[in-house]
Amino acid sequence: MQLQIQVPSILAHCLSGNQETSLHASQLDEALEILWQEYPLLKHHCLTKSGNIRPHILIYFNEDNIKWLDSLECKITEGDRLTILQAVSGGG
């Protein structure tokens, strides 16, 4: 099934300048593996060397943060989306 993927503009350079892409996979865990293989720079920005999600990165499968899911073996269905957000702080 096709999964729509969105990243913020700050990470668009990881997707060849695009903020959106899509890929085909049957489960979320498979989709993430494909995403990291196709976009290694995105993987570098999102994951630590040990493969954990960096603290300032949020990854949502539809409305759920994937850290909240019991398993990444979620079946992908029509209209599902993956959204990657990067926390930015600062100001004064």
Image (cartoon, rainbow, N blue to C red):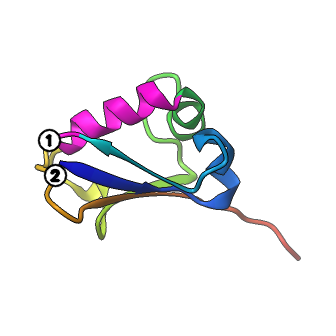
Asked if 30 appears above or below 17 in the picture, the reply is: above
Q: Is residue 51 left or right of residue 25?
A: right
Whether tag 1 and tag 2 are in contact, CB under 8 A, the answer is: yes
Q: Quadrant of residue 78?
A: bottom left
The residue labelled by disc 2 is 76
Q: Earlier in the sequence, mark 1 or mark 2?
A: 1
Q: Which mark is residue 26?
A: 1
Disc 1 secondary structure class: loop
Q: Position of residue 7 (x, y in %)?
A: 53, 56
Asked if 54 appears above or below 83 in the picture, the reply is: above
Q: Position of residue 79 (x, y in %)?
A: 23, 65
Q: Which mark is residue 54?
A: none
Q: Quadrant of the C terminus?
A: bottom right
Asked if 68 appears above or below 53 in the picture, the reply is: below
Q: Magenta segment range?
A: 25-39
User: Would residue 28 be counted in the magenta stretch?
Assistant: yes
Disc 2 secondary structure class: loop
Q: Quadrant of residue 81?
A: bottom left
Q: Residue at x 45, y 41 (%)?
A: 53
